[in-house]
Amino acid sequence: MNNGASFVGRVVSNRMQKTVVVAVDRLVWVPKLKVFERRTSRHLAHCDLGEGLPPPGAPAAAAAAGGAAAAGGAAAGGAASAAAPTRAADDENAPRPLHVGDVVRIAWTPRKSRHKSYRVERVLRRARVYAPTLGEAALAEHRARRAAELAGASSSASGEGGTATPPRVARAEAALEVARRRLAQLREAHDREMAKALSQTRS
């Protein structure tokens, strides 16, 4: 039973091995100004992945597993289709170190050090952190899409018996033509103004 306080905050530092700094925002009423003031408190919280920190979505996955176990008379195909999302959720919610920006819930715990009296009870939301594998996958997808576009353009050109213009080149040529027309209009306006000013000077 947890009789201590618990707060929801975001991780602002994870440089220590088993400790993270969690910033907790709160609103405080200022009677003199009659306004609410936002204040931030920073707490050191104990975080050890070896202690089985529950990731987001763990209760839902456990409930789904319990429901599947209760429905033992279901068909094998239905059980296989229900097990696939559970495995995907387990891979997504695999324990990993906390990153800056993660939203966590911290709870009071007996003092572990001079400044550490809280522990990370649960991870509520993961921060979007760049991963090299995801970047490589996105780059490969972009290259494959670009190659498909070029292949489609070349096939259409060979079918028509001519050379097709890529969409980007066509847009660039259209923008260049608009700029040329605009420049010609500006030159004509400049020549008219100069001729008008010259005629006024001579008169």
Image (cartoon, rainbow, N blue to C red):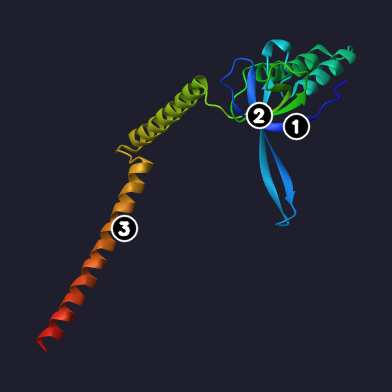
Residue 54 at x, y percent in the picture = 74, 19
Dots 1 and 2: beta carbons under 8 Å? yes
User: Does residue 159 appear to the left or right of 42 in the view shown?
Assistant: left
Give the labeled residue for mark 2. Answer: 22
Quadrant that contains the C terminus: bottom left
User: Does residue 66 appear to the left or right of 121 in the view shown?
Assistant: right
Instruction: Give the SS element for disc 2.
Output: strand
| Label 3, label 2: how far apart the Cα atoms are | 55 Å
User: Sequence-wise, which precedes: disc 1 or disc 2?
Assistant: 1
Instruction: Give the SS element for disc 3.
Output: helix
Residue type pointed to by label 2: Val
Q: Nearer the viewer, mark 3 or mark 2?
A: 2
Residue type pointed to by label 3: Val
Residue type pointed to by label 1: Phe
Give the labeled residue for mark 3. Answer: 178
- Residue 186 picture quarter: bottom left
Quadrant that contains the N terminus: top right
Disc 3 packing (10 Å; few <14; some 14–19; many ≥20): few
Task: Tell me what residue is drawn at x 23 percent, y 64 percent.
Answer: 184
Which mark, by number, is residue 7?
Answer: 1
The residue lying furthest to the left in this view is 202
Residue 2 at x, y percent in the picture = 85, 22
| Label 3, label 1: how far apart the Cα atoms are | 59 Å
Task: Tell me what residue is drawn at x 84 percent, y 14 percent.
Answer: 75
Task: Tell me what residue is drawn at x 81 percent, y 11 percent.
Answer: 76
Front residue of 66 and 109 = 109
